[in-house]
Image (tube, rainbow, N blue to C red):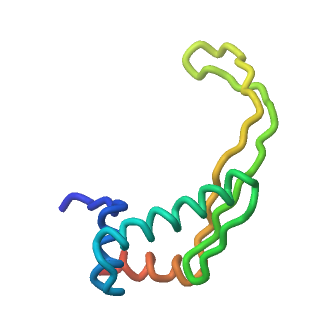
Amino acid sequence: MSPKTLTRMDLSEAVFQEVGLSRNESAQLVESVLEHMSNALVNGETVKISSFGTFGVRDKAARVGRNPKTGEEVPIHPRRVLTFRPSHLMKERVAAGNKK
């Protein structure tokens, strides 16, 4: 069994089925929500979705890394990274799914 990937189209189809908007309106709604979330994260805000998890941005400082093959030290520049912390309810749902 190969794992399936949930896509934007799948999300808009689910909105279409559940809410009853047209397919076009459903796609626009999904795009709008994702755009809103992206903009908030770009601005350094935290995005919290109750019973799902929290998305955030973290600033990582510059550091010295090492090439494992050559042992050569390489500078790693400071950067911003996206983080996700699942809620305890999401963790429980995923864990319960593993027991099937």
Q: Does residue 69 sit above or below 43 in this rendering?
A: above
Which quarter of the rendering shows the C terminus? bottom left
Q: Does residue 82 sit above or below 89 in this rendering?
A: above
Residue at far bottom of view: 19
What is the count of numbered marks? Answer: 0
Percent position of residue 73, x then y: 72, 17
Which quarter of the rendering shows the N terminus? bottom left
Q: Is residue 100 left or right of residue 83?
A: left
Percent position of residue 38, x then y: 60, 56
User: In the figure, residue 36 lies in which quadrant?
Assistant: bottom right
Q: Does residue 20 sit above or below 46 in this rendering?
A: below
Q: Is residue 14 left or right of residue 48?
A: left
User: In the figure, residue 12 lies in which quadrant?
Assistant: bottom left
Percent position of residue 92, x then y: 50, 82
- Image point 55% across, 59% down: which residue? 35
Q: Does residue 47 sit above or below 62 in this rendering?
A: below
Percent position of residue 62, x then y: 80, 31
Q: Is residue 50 left or right of residue 15?
A: right
Q: Is residue 89 left or right of residue 42?
A: left
